[in-house]
Image (cartoon, grey):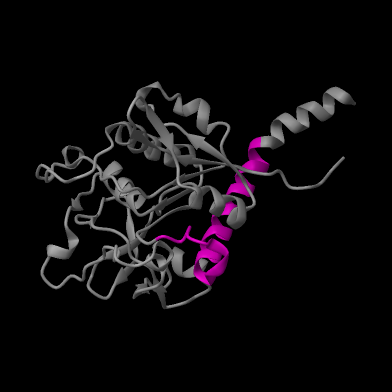
Amino acid sequence: MSTALPVPLIGITSCLKAHEHSAFHSVQDKYVDAVVAGTSAVPVLIPAIGPALDMDALLARLDGVLVTGSPSNVDPAYYGGPPPRPDNEADPARDATTLPLIRATLAAGVPLLAICRGIQELNVALGGTLHQHVHELPGRRDHRSDKSLPYAERYAPVHAIELTPGGRLQAVMGGAARIEVNSLHGQGIDRLAAGLVVEAVAEDGTIEAVSVPKAAGFALGVQWHPEWRVLENVWSRRLFAAFGEAARTRAAGRLAGPRALDHRAVA
């Protein structure tokens, strides 16, 4: 009988993008590539279908959930914020999918990694609020990417973050106290949800990472983009490797029962 560890399945949240004649459930290739290269797992795309998604059935088959970034923003109605400006990009189908999915993922003990819009969704899903325009706050830097740069250059590290001493993220990062990260976001966490703890902050006070201390499994959110060319950055490699290890542990436990039953049936 083979003793090889099972290959985990990691779900990746999708956006719903409108086109001329129809809409597309879409995920940028960088997230798929990061799951494949950074976790050695099989990526499974989760459509943005809101209440039509059977989350219990889905999570019973998944070993991790990656909540992606996106150009769109969470509808402020979900956290009691002011109406968005006319140029705001929205994705109501994604909101209707990811917010309950995050809560269900945590309740099921499935490992969770939330990136950029994902950390904002994590905060809102658990009762927190967002700043819609971080760069307009006194003393804050402009965390948006420079659109005049070539696309790849926008993902270069641009500022440092301080990791919480003794925190979960610091453990993942091998005890580092300070790391350099990229920055491509306009919104950010305002009031932290009661179920979260801060794992890292930027020099201007912007929350850059959080964890869910009461979660049964791995549960981290980061404001930067570690998925970009994941193997080229030591901190990105560490983060995705830890997520992948948590997913493999979940896969081993999830599959132990059926595999044992199959073995007895053959015997």
Answer whether residue 48 is visible to the viewer in this image.
no
Residue 150, picture quadrant: bottom left
Horizontally, residue 204 falls left or right of residue 102, namely left
Q: At which x and y percent is residue 107?
A: 43, 38
Outermost residue toward the right in this view: 267
Answer whether residue 167 is visible to the viewer in this image.
yes
Check the picture and name the quadrant holding the C terminus.
top right
Residue range of the region highlighted in magenta in the rendering: 225-254
Residue sitting at x 23%, y 55%:
187
Horizontally, residue 88 falls left or right of residue 68, namely left
Check the picture and name the quadrant holding the N terminus.
top right
Q: At which x and y percent is residue 77?
A: 16, 37
Front-most of 67 and 177?
A: 67
Membership of 230 in magenta stretch: yes
Horizontally, residue 74 falls left or right of residue 237, namely left
Residue sitting at x 52%, y 70%:
233
Note whether 129 is above or below 262 in the view shown. below
Horizontally, residue 115 falls left or right of residue 194, namely right
Note whether 125 is above or below 194 in the view shown. above
Q: At which x and y percent is residue 6?
A: 71, 43
